[in-house]
Amino acid sequence: MMHHTLSVTVQDKPGVLARVASMCSLRGFNIRSLAVGPIHQPGLSKITLVVDDVAVEQVTKQLHKLVNVLKVSELDPNDSLEREVMLVRVSADPGSRREVRDTAEVFGATTIDVGAKSVTFELCDHPQRLSDFLALIGHYGVVDLVKSGRIAMARDAKARTKAGEQ
Amino acid sequence: MTKMTGAAALIKSLEHEGVEVAFGVPGGAILPAYDPLLDSPIRHILARHEQGAGHMAEGYAHATGRVGVVIVTSGPGATNIMTPLQDALMDSVPMVAITGQVALASMGNDAFQEAPTTGMAMHCTKHTFLVTDANEICEAVHQAFHLASTGRKGPVLVDIPKDLLAAEIEWHEPEPVDLPGYKPSRTGHSRQIERAIDLIMEARQPVLYVGGGIIAAGASEELLRFAEALDVPVTTTLMARGAFPDAHRLAMGMPGMHGTYTAVTAMQESDLLIALGTRFDDRVTGNPATFAPGAKVIHVDIDPAEIGKVRNPEVPIVGDVKVVLEQLGSALEARLVDDSLPDRSPWLETIAGWQAKYPLHYDQEPDGPVKAQYVIEQLLEATDGDGIVVSGVGQHQMWASQFWSFSKPRTWINSGGLGTMGFAVPAAIGAKVGMPDELVVAVDGDGSFQMTFQEMVTAAAEDVPIKVVLINNGGHGMVRQWQTLFYDRRYSATDLSGGSPNYAALAEACGWVGMMVDTPADVGPALRKMLATDDRPVLLEVRTDPDEMVWPMVPAGGSCSDIALGPEDL
């Protein structure tokens, strides 16, 4: 199913995340991913919200109705930078460790922990790359997995226009 | 700089907002606020239940257009106002609720009378504030009033922990409202205004579909001018009764599930709906897929989220409907310099034909059981239509809306969106407190009345002489109607006649005048006697026909084209 990525700038007020998340759930907007953190402007945070392809206009309008929401922009997947961090622990005994790490290296994943029977990788990349990596590495057996939720921002429009002119 | 407690600052902040009256019930956590209230010019109406206080604040706001204020304590005080808050949210009623909370340090510890007030109220208010610093009380109150009374009006809650009410602070004038995420648009986009006029110039069978936004915006005069300039028939939703005079030649009455045949059918046959301050509620549209199938839509609303929520309009206009109507009026005038409106007479003749053929109808036999509709008509005659009518929820509400002839806004007060039974008595008290010189009559049903009738005590104690016409059909009539029509007459839990109190005696016990009639001939004289009593509240119980049903009817989820005039049409 298609999805939409919304970048929502909010005031850092108590309960703002609860307002956003539970408004979505009460109005039946399914949240696929949600990530939040403070930004460079004091008192403000940005929520990256990924929702299913249902009535995105209603989601946007309902978000705007929340008093602590300052800005909502929908990010075009072809025109935005999307990242997600994944930590994944896979089974690897000393015999298979080399092979597992070779696969990880192709994706630029970093080895951050090695145990007797497992290796743990960190990968920060486009969500699609994370899925691709997981599909391959999964064959060795995933022991544990955690993802950060997607963060995204629009590409720099000015830079792109210049590149287009050349 | 004046030093005072947080509680004193709260009351002073309310005075600063121009509050003249507050409805409430005290309790532990809000106790500090009730002390400075004693010395304040603000009149406090002590309700007998917090839900009653909430509906009083709503009734006050409906009648006056000002912000209604309710003050309650933490825990059960707060949970008891959730119904009025949701009611006010759905009907866009400006209201500020002040709730006491347990001390800041106790919050989250399941303290005595603790409830997660702001969490519960988050989705049944426009906004909530949890004050965590006593110095912010003034700002929170100021912002709450701003939010409640601007844009799409609605309820706002301010939750204040008890220790902050007791804390000493320095009084300061509240800082100007700084809400960067809240900037309601007032003026409609000029290009959309022109596009709206384009559609209006082409339309052969237009309808003005008018909602409560007209009343909230105070735009009745603008509406009247616009409707007359266009020569377009008008339907006023349940929330908009009174926004356009029912006696006007262009008035078609109420649309929707129990709307007039003419209003419902005109929308179905229309080629252009001009929707003003209304939200295409399911009680109006029936099945939205079959609603007004041939109509283009111009949708004007102050809340952008209402536009396109149910029906995608050809022309969306976000703005204050009063301002937008002025814009549309000027744009139309400019257009009419070189152009003229299509001939409306065939459309208006069709409508007049429906009105003549399918009027609202009931049969009152002189010796038969009293029909509720007859009571409404008799009340209309006895009052000359002059007064504020407040209703509960159910059959009596529909009959009051159908059979009253409204001539001005803010004279019809009811719970439209939430359908809150028990609304009438407390809302009527609030309306009368706000408009003491107006006649305020609650038309209530016996089921609805029994949900909040303890507020009769409040009316007597606070000297608020409202009238209640109690339509007693011995049960939950609207539910019973559905059981008759859709559940094979299996009457489950809708009979209230068995345990009915003696309502007149109950009223007398509360310090009211109580009366009862049960024959058609007695209704008129009893109503006149009721109206002649001014020194005390009066309750007149009228025993009515339990089998009477509300018609016409569009079954829930059905098509408005299948409107039934009686059981034979279902």
Image (tube, coloured by chain):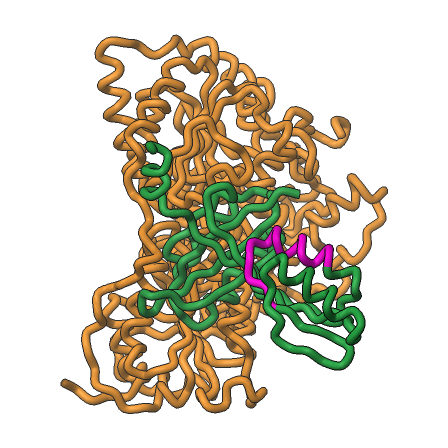
Chain colours: A green, B orange
User: In this view of the protein, which residue sits in the foreground, B491 or A54?
Assistant: A54
B268 inside magenta stretch: no
In the rendered image of this protein, does residue B373 appear above or below residue A43?
above
On the image, the x and y values in percent for residue B409 come to 37, 43
Camera-nearest residue between B430 and A100: A100
User: What residue is at 48 percent from the left and 65 percent from the top?
Assistant: A36
Q: Quadrant of the N terminus of chain B?
A: bottom left
Which span of residues is magenta-colored? A122-136
- The quadrant the C terminus of chain B occupies is top right
Residue at screen point 41% across, 68% down: A38
Residue at 51% in and 74% down: B117
Residue at the location (36% across, 71% down)?
B22
Up/down of B291 relative to B212, above or below = above
Residue B547, percent from left and from top: 74, 43
Q: Is residue B401 left or right of residue B552?
A: left
Q: Main secondary structure of the magenta part?
A: helix
* Position in image of residue A88 (x %, y %): 67, 68
**Please, is residue B268 above or below residue B444 in the view?**
above
Residue nearest the observer in this picture, A74 or B562: A74
Q: Is residue B535 visible?
A: no
Q: Is residue B439 above or below residue B376?
A: below
Relative image position of residue B34 (x, y in whole percent): 36, 84
Instruction: Kindly tell me whether residue B341 is visible in this rendering.
Output: yes
